[in-house]
Image (cartoon, rainbow, N blue to C red):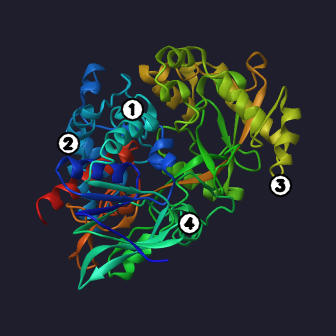
Amino acid sequence: MGTKNYHADCVVVGAGLAGIYACLKLLEAGKKVILLDRDTREHIGGQAVESFGGVFMADSPVQRRFRIKDNLEMAYQDWCSFAEFTAADELGRAWARGFIENSTRLLYHGLKKYAVSYFPVVHWVERGLFVPGNSVPRFHMVWGTGYGLIKRLAAALLAYEGKGNFQLHFQHNVKNFIDQNGKIAGVQGLSEVDQQDFIATGDNVIMAAGGYGANLDVVRKNWHRDWNTPPKDLLVGCHQFNNAQLHDQVQALGGDVINQDRMWNYAAGIPHPHPKRPRHGLSLVPPKSALWMDALGKRIGPVPLITAFDTRSMVSAICKAPAGYSWQIMNRKIAVKELAVSGSEHNPAIRDEKLISFLLSVILGNSTLVDHFCQDSAHFVSAPTLEELVPKMNAINQPYIIESQLLRSEIESYDNMISRGPTYFNDDQLRRLSQLRNYKGDRLRTCKFQKILDPKAGPLIAVKLNILVRKSLGGVKTNLRSQALRPDNTPIQGLYAVGESAGFGGGSIHGLRALEGTFLGNCVYNSEMAVNSILAGN
């Protein structure tokens, strides 16, 4: 059996958001394009399809309508504060400034062409805890979630099929790059449809193949020192082919892959009740009114854990606690009002653009979601009383044991603080709940100082939470044109890296932390920079 040969002006590897957007811009400019992806056609869009669809924008029309006063300089200062950039991160700083300055132009005005719109309420996440984060709300939710975003962009791309300038090949495993005298002239690999070798050549190659989070060997090897040792039971919340295969090939070419110890992991992961891939996990949006406990039943502290402030610090605290996993304790009232999942699959009202259903879920809560997990997830346990709940927790907590009296003491201490009233709150979680409820975007989805052991709010629910690996913040080092760089900062001619392959920008755009909503947006921004460079003949 011979080798398949493809040729075009540009070869794009990876049909996720970054790859799709790059192809669209190249085709609109009249270029001939080949798009290769290892997955099947029905999974076009990669991880973005499963995402919640949050997009970071600064000084956007949505913010202005919501009377949120933002500006580019404040957004940049917030970004740098949260990133904790080092002297080695000057390229990351430049990428961050470029993205912030172009975020609204690209993501609000630019995506209008493809009928992409946003929910009118801007969410406020990553506000900062030990260092300042988002000073104002900037998390814009795509109407339709990541699923809707990809549906629209993919439809625009697939309209080019059969018109002569576009070749799209799925189940094509790209294994390495073709190097001709120091210039990348294409890629080669294996068609997993018929087990036939292929070669795809072009003047330029864009690597949009994702990160390395699904390769737990790479994750564990590069586990950040701030996070102690990697927990035993890591879950994977990213695409199954995010395996570092092409990162290794870039290094073999002499390219620079940097900051692989920088990852955006989540504290509240559970195994998917119906997994589609190995170690498949879901990232919960954990209730803010629940208590976060360690494997012994002690409240994690001294600073209580609560989402929406600093995800990285939560991961750090849990990794340093016994067992490297955690528990959240709540009651049904809290769960129905506040529990959510970060992704399109478990947000059907937003995903399917059913406004009335979504508004009802905000007002009435989501009892269907809570019932689903209580019935289908082994990590959710429920009981009318604490004495009945603890044995169920211990059954999946081995070899650790939670003592009922210790757990009761921790919860009652919190509940008693609520009884004293807001004037006398001396608990950091309650103070932060007060802050959250001052913002109308959070008020409807946050309980008003709800006691855990309130019998009228039961039954009790406990959720066992694992660390979930999600985003690669390190990756191929690229200049501001998205050209792959060597350690001496000279470009590898003909090779570009975009999206998660490049850590969303230069392998360093986020520093240690992300302000959330910056992943999808930078897939678009990186790709625009690569396409502009290619069209300029660089």
- Give whichever of discs 4 and 1 has the lower sequence position: 1
Query: Which residue shows up at 41% across the image and 30% down it?
Result: 123
Instruction: Name the residue nearer the viewer: 61 or 194.
Output: 194
x and y percentages locating residue 311 in the rendered image: 50, 47
Q: Rounded to the nearest whole Å, what is the CA distance between mark 2 and mark 3?
A: 50 Å
Q: Residue at x 67, y 24 (%)?
A: 368
Residue named by callout 1? 142
The quarter in which the C terminus is drawn is bottom left
Q: Is residue 507 visible?
A: yes
Q: Amino acid at mark 2?
A: Glu
Given residues 33 and 310, the one toward you in this image is 33
Q: Which residue is mark 3?
A: 398
Q: Which mark is residue 73?
A: 2
- Please tell me whether mark 2 or mark 4 is closer to you in this view: 4
The numbered mark, 1 or 2, whose residue comes first in the sequence reads 2
- Pointer 3 local density, CA inside 10 Å: few below 14, some 14–19, many at least 20: few
Q: Is residue 284 above or below residue 21?
A: above
Q: In the rendered image, which residue does mark 4 sit on?
A: 215
Please tell me which of labels 2 and 4 falls first in the chain.
Answer: 2
CA gap between label 1 and label 2 equals 24 Å
Label 4 sits on what residue type? Asn
Is residue 133 something one can see in this rendering?
no
Q: Which element is circle 1 on?
A: loop
Question: In the rendered structure, which amino acid carries the disc numbered 3?
Answer: Gln
